Image: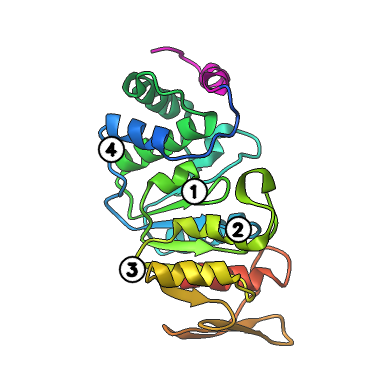
Amino acid sequence: MRFTSLDAWLDWQSTLNPVEIELGLERIADALQRLGLSSQFGCPLIMVAGTNGKGSVVSMLESIATAAGLKVCCYTSPHIIHYNERIKINGEAVDDDSLCQSFERIDQARGDIALTYFEFGTLAAIDIFMRAKPDLVIMEIGLGGRLDAVNVMEPDVSVITSIAIDHTDWLGDNREDIAREKAGIMSENKATIYGEVDAPASLLEMAQQKAVEFYHLGEHYKIESSMSGNWSLQSPFTAMQNLPAPALKGEFQKGNAATAIMA
């Protein structure tokens, strides 16, 4: 094994590729193939992108699925305290040894591919989740969507929480271009949930081009708040009344909760 500690692996990974952020799927797709892993899990995958609300929606999705008794694997970034927080199984962060063993498998398989720090971590999540045989996988996009390493996988449901001006050096300097990049996670003929009332024209065009099953907050699913603080959700699937306010603070979290329920 190249290193025996997680810190040593992470320090080395940060130097492997000279560019801290290098978008593109070619390197990670090649490494995934060399690892002998598929771009599909043996269970549904929900992929979450967006400018704001990603973390909230992922947290709610994970809580809903776990409460339903499913075995849930969840990949997020960045971490708050420990790197292990990025890769969780049933709400528990994976241990150092599991990460080190996965990093070693990736290192042995990658050959001369100069993976970025984020690509290495994403491959580790995929590798660990494949071995865990979960009922559901939830993966959060790191930056953008179309060329983000997470998008090497093929989602069954895509979630785009919101679109605002962010990461202009990589995604474009206007909302329409940024929407196009985030729409890159949509899978053809599968469902996409959009968690914002105001939808950029480019997002709707991409949804139509890919023939996705598109659900848009304020149009296909709607929320209504009551004086008590509770709220209701109307959707093509069901009407849910008298829902409690989300534990996460802010009126906007009801929209995030509705988006998670739809997914």
Which label was assigned to residue 43?
none
Three-letter residue code for mark 2: Asp
Dot placed on the residue nearer the N-terminal end, 1 or 4 = 4
Query: 10 Å neighbourhood of mark 4: few (<14), some, or many (≥20)?
Result: some
Gap in angstroms between the C-alphas marked 2 and 4: 32 Å
Three-letter residue code for mark 1: Gly
Dot placed on the residue nearer the N-terminal end, 3 or 4 = 4
> The C terminus is located in which quarter?
bottom left
Q: In the image shown, does 193 or 179 lie closer to the viewer?
A: 179
Q: Nearer the viewer, mark 3 or mark 1?
A: 3
Location of residue 205 in the rendering, given as x and y in whole percent from the top left corner: 49, 71
Which residue is tagged 2?
Answer: 177
Is mark 3 in CB contact (under 8 Å) with mark 4?
no
Q: Nearer the viewer, mark 2 or mark 4?
A: 2
Which residue is tagged 3?
Answer: 189
Q: Residue at x 45, y 69 (%)?
A: 207
Q: Which residues are magenta?
A: 1-17
Which label was assigned to residue 37?
4
Q: Residue at x 48, y 51 (%)?
A: 146
Q: Nearer the viewer, mark 1 or mark 4?
A: 4
Which residue is tagged 1?
Answer: 91
Gap in angstroms between the C-alphas marked 3 and 2: 22 Å
Dot placed on the residue nearer the N-terminal end, 2 or 4 = 4
- Would you identify the image quadrant in which residue 20 lies? top right
